[in-house]
Image: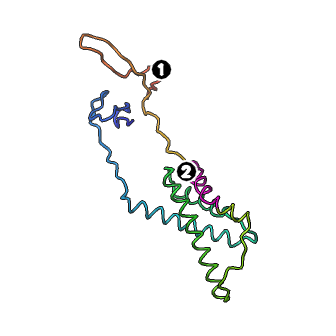
Amino acid sequence: MPNCDKCGFQLPDGASFCPNCGATVKKKMEVSESPRKSVMNLLKMGLLGAFLSVTLSSFSLIPLYFVPSFISSLIVIFLSKARRIEDATWIAMSVYLFENAIIASMVLASNLIVGQVELSQTITLVDLIMFIAYPVTALVAGYIGVNLVPKKKEEPLPVPYKEGEERGPGGIVYSLKRNPEEISAP
């Protein structure tokens, strides 16, 4: 819930005036990104992660399977500050998808350059299991990545107060009463 800019009182939803001091409440317009712009940002992050993943994979002498994609997804999700699980999952999935496309293109191109068109590599059971695990690890990377992003901290109220309620001839009056010991003298 928002607080009054003038006195710090916690405002009820939809309030136009502060019930404590009577100040006009400034409505904060929430500007949302256009869907096209947010999708483009997610795809850009996915491409960045894919290139990072390919770079990590190229330095390995043994097959790392999904590990470079997983690490790259976590890094890119953290850098993009994705706070929604949907955004983090889209980023992770696009990292995995683009990374596989880039590596497949590189393998195909190198086979064509050498003149070896057919695939001579045999698929092992470990390869098959790791390939099936790719989408699952992308979802896990999205979940872990969104939890790595620091959450927004709520600011404390500028004025310490305690709520009070008084019954009188005009009905119930709600007010804030400051504790004298909590108010510091200037």
Q: Amino acid at mark 1?
A: Glu
**Quadrant of the image containing the N terminus:** top left
Residue at image point 60% right, 69% down: 100
Q: Mark 1 or 2 closer to N-term?
A: 2
- Callout 1: few (<14), some (14-19), or many (20+) C-alpha neighbours within 10 Å? few
Q: Which residue is mark 2?
A: 146
In the image, is residue 136 above or below residue 60? above
171 left or right, relative to 1 = left
**Tag 2's secondary structure?**
helix
Q: Residue at x 45, y 25 (%)?
A: 183
Q: Which residue is mark 1?
A: 181
User: Vertically, is 65 above or below 160?
Assistant: below
Nearer to me, 9 or 53? 53
**Which mark is drawn over residue 129?**
none
Q: Quadrant of residue 38?
A: bottom left
Disc 2 residue type?
Answer: Val
Mark 2: few, some, or many residues within 10 Å (few <14, many ≥20)? many
The secondary element bearing badge 1 is classed as helix
Q: Residue furthest top?
A: 169
Q: Residue at x 67, y 68 (%)?
A: 56
Give the foreground label among 1 and 2.
2
Residue span colored magenta: 132-148
Give residue 4's quadrant in the image.
top left
Above-or-below relation of 27 to 12 = below
Q: Pick whichever, 19 or 15, lies toward us.
A: 15
Q: How is the image coloured?
A: rainbow
User: Badges 1 and 2: C-beta atoms under 8 Å apart?
Assistant: no
Per the image, is 146 magenta? yes
Measured in 3D between alpha carbons, the distance from the residue under mark 1 to the one under mark 2, in whole angstroms, is: 42 Å
What's the magenta bit mostly, secondary-structure-wise? helix
Where is residue 65 shown, x and y percent of the image? 68, 64
